């Protein structure tokens, strides 16, 4: 009998529990009639992968369609009116502190710009707990409401203080929305198009930047305060669309598994994949998610036994920097850092000022607007190629392509900035290099900063990891936004030298740390980063993978090696009990392991133990006699038998 088939036969033995539950048995029979995939859980190095990869039908057009629908609201990404609105005289009359002739006007302009990013930075740290508790999509709905509150304050702001407060609250919504959207997309997407769908986040942001700029540009001709209050108010419309439409889409299957809603997870997967719940590919993917989540939960228990509350929360944040996960964090935080310190928002926020400094004062507003359109075109190109080219290639060559234009601009600025009118060709060459830069950025780091962090973290760490990466985006954005005005006025061409150096450092970082993630499942990335190479993790992963393969229905999670390890049992036992939903009580398991048995019934207390009661109500009070019949499965290798003597089917009740 081939090894692979033997493994699958052993893993797939039917261990039906609660046999007198008609509802669950009917569900089991339906799933068992589904086509079964021949897959393997063994990796190239002999370790056990979290789950076998399901081969989904080639329905790219349909996958893109539902993926795009999942972020339909984000296509109207709520974006702040461009700070070019500061040029409006009505704006200066309402907020005199920002008038060009006001003392420290440049500082207060940068402060107003940066407070949105600072609010976004702060918002990133409460979102993970919210997302893990109430779901990804309900979290997006709540932060949309927070965004609307901030937009109302900005629209009605009577003075500078209220305006800044409103922008800070709006920033909380922006930051958490930018964090939650890629997290949700990454968890509902099949791996072969996940990168493409994640680019929609970047595309939505750029569309928001472009639309907000041109709305503000057009409103400057309104001869009243509506010239700036209308752009502020339009933010509420798109935020309301996001908060409402998100409820028409499924919950994240991975979140449903995290909260042990397994049947809902299968239904969500079936809806997302447009396949029936009986399809073997849906069940296979659910098994994979279950195995990976169980593995991470067990390892989290082992890492922080007995810790709860704030202490556990802080320790889980610290886990992002531990030996086994620091490389993931370097990738997730690094791409966010280099996205912002490539200087993109120096161009976006202060493009009119930059183009004026390059000798193009008369056309500065038009050039700034078309620069954003160039970025939009590049992001659309990234949408088409990101899954073909790969993340690592884009990270390396994108950073290099951004650094070269800065070198050219710095050289021309240093040579001709004293007399731009006498050297118009040099000024236009700088403008051309700005367009080269923004296109290189749009096709590489614009989508990568939202794609990579969502891909590189494991399921349990993903919400915090993506939060940290997104917080890095906003904190870096805040620093660049506040520092750019004085840099332009005081450092001259040194501003461009600084950003060129940062881009070339990005090349070095990408070459050393960024792996290729295209086409890989979120669980397969464990092998890429080498997180499960320890002997203990190897054993836990082996048992969890086998248990997930043996699950024929979401109603019965199998308790085996990993579950008993989680309960604090010693290694080396030879058989594993089966239970619904959770761990077995330690003492009963120890008693069952004294001697090798192929099949034995043991009695487990009801609520006194970890096992949850069946839905049809056979419950017992803690400490009282009674419970459920639990079967024990032999985990030792099966002895070689004559083919005619091999048992067919599962164990008999």
Image (cartoon, helix red, strand yellow):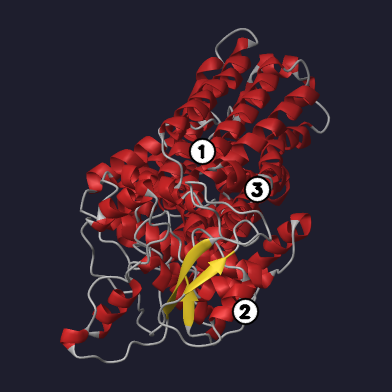
Q: Nearer the viewer, residue 98 or 170?
A: 170
Residue assigned mark 1: 137
Q: Which mark is on residue 129?
A: 3
- The quadrant the C terminus occupies is bottom left
SS at mark 3 in the image? helix
Q: Earlier in the sequence, mark 3 or mark 1?
A: 3
Q: Is residue 485 left or right of residue 511?
A: right
Mark 1–mark 2 Cα distance, whole angstroms, equals 38 Å
Q: Which mark is residue 205?
A: none
Q: Foreground: 234 or 4?
A: 4
Q: Residues within 10 Å of mark 2 (few under 14, many from 20)?
A: some
| Residue 277 % position (x, y) | 30, 48
Tell me which residue sits at (67%, 57%) in the image. 622
- Please give the residue where the numbered disc 2 appears in the rendered image: 569
Q: CA distance from mark 3 to mark 1?
A: 13 Å
Residue ranking furthest to the top: 223
Total marks shown come to 3
Disc 1, SS: helix
């Amino acid at each position: 009998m081939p090894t692979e088939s033997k493994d699958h036969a052993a893993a797939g033995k039917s261990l039906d529990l609660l046999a007198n539950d008609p509802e669950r048995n009917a569900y089991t029979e339906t799933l068992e009639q589904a086509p079964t995939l021949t897959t393997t859980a063994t990796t190239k190095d002999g370790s056990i992968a979290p789950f076998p990869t399901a081969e989904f039908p080639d329905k790219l057009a349909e996958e893109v369609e539902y993926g795009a629908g999942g972020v339909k609201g984000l296509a109207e990404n709520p974006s702040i009116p461009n700070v070019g609105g500061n040029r409006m005289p009505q704006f200066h009359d309402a907020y005199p502190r920002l008038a060009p002739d006001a003392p420290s006007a440049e500082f207060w302009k940068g402060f107003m710009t940066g407070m949105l990013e600072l609010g976004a930075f702060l918002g990133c740290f409460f979102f993970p707990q919210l997302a893990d508790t109430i779901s990804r999509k309900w979290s997006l709905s709540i932060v949309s409401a927070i965004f609307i509150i901030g937009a109302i304050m900005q629209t009605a702001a009577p003075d500078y203080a209220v305006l800044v407060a409103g922008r800070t609250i709006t920033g909380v919504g922006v930051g958490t929305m930018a964090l939650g959207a890629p997290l949700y997309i990454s968890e509902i997407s099949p791996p072969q198009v996940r990168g493409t769908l994640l680019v929609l986040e970047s595309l939505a942001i750029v569309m928001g930047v472009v639309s907000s700029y041109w709305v503000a540009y057009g409103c400057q001709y309104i001869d009243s305060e509506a010239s700036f209050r209308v752009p502020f108010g339009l933010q509420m419309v798109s935020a309301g669309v996001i908060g409402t439409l998100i409820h028409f889409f499924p919950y994240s299957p991975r979140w449903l598994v995290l909260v042990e809603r397994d049947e809902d997870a299968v239904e969500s997967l079936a809806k997302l994949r447009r396949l029936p719940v009986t399809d073997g590919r849906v069940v296979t993917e659910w098994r994979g998610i279950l195995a990976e989540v169980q593995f991470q939960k067990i390892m989290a228990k082992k890492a922080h036994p007995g810790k709860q509350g704030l202490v556990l929360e802080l320790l889980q944040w610290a886990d992002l920097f531990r030996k086994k996960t620091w490389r993931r964090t370097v990738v997730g935080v690094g791409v966010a850092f280099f996205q912002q310190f490539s200087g993109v928002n120096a161009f976006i926020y202060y493009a009119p000022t930059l183009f004026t400094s390059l000798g193009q004062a008369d056309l500065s507003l038009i050039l700034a607007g078309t620069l954003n359109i160039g970025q939009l075109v590049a992001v659309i190109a990234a949408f088409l190629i990101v899954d073909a080219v790969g993340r690592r290639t884009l990270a390396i060559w994108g950073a290099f392509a951004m650094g070269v234009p800065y070198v050219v601009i710095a050289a021309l600025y240093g040579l001709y900035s004293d007399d731009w009118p006498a050297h118009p060709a040099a000024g236009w060459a700088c403008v051309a290099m700005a367009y080269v830069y923004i296109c290189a950025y749009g096709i590489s780091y614009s989508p990568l900063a939202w794609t990579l962090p969502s891909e590189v973290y494991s399921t349990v760490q993903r919400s915090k990891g993506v939060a940290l990466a997104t917080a890095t985006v906003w904190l870096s954005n805040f620093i660049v936004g506040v520092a750019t005005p004085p840099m332009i006025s005081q450092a001259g061409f040194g501003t461009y030298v600084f950003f060129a150096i940062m881009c070339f450092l990005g090349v070095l970082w990408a070459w050393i740390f960024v792996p290729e993630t295209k086409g890989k499942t979120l669980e397969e990335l464990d092998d890429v980063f080498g997180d499960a190479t320890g002997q203990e993790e190897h054993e836990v992963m082996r048992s969890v993978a086998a248990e997930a393969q043996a699950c024929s229905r979401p109603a019965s999670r199998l308790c085996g090696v990993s579950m008993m390890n989680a309960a604090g049992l010693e290694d080396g036992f030879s058989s594993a009990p089966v239970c619904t939903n959770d761990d077995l009580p330690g003492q009963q398991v120890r008693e069952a392991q004294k001697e090798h048995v192929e099949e034995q019934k043991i009695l487990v207390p009801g609520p006194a133990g970890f096992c949850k009661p069946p839905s049809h109500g056979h419950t017992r009070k803690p400490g009282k006699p009674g419970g459920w019949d639990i079967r024990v499965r032999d985990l030792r290798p099966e002895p070689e038998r004559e083919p005619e003597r091999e048992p067919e089917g599962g164990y008999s009740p």
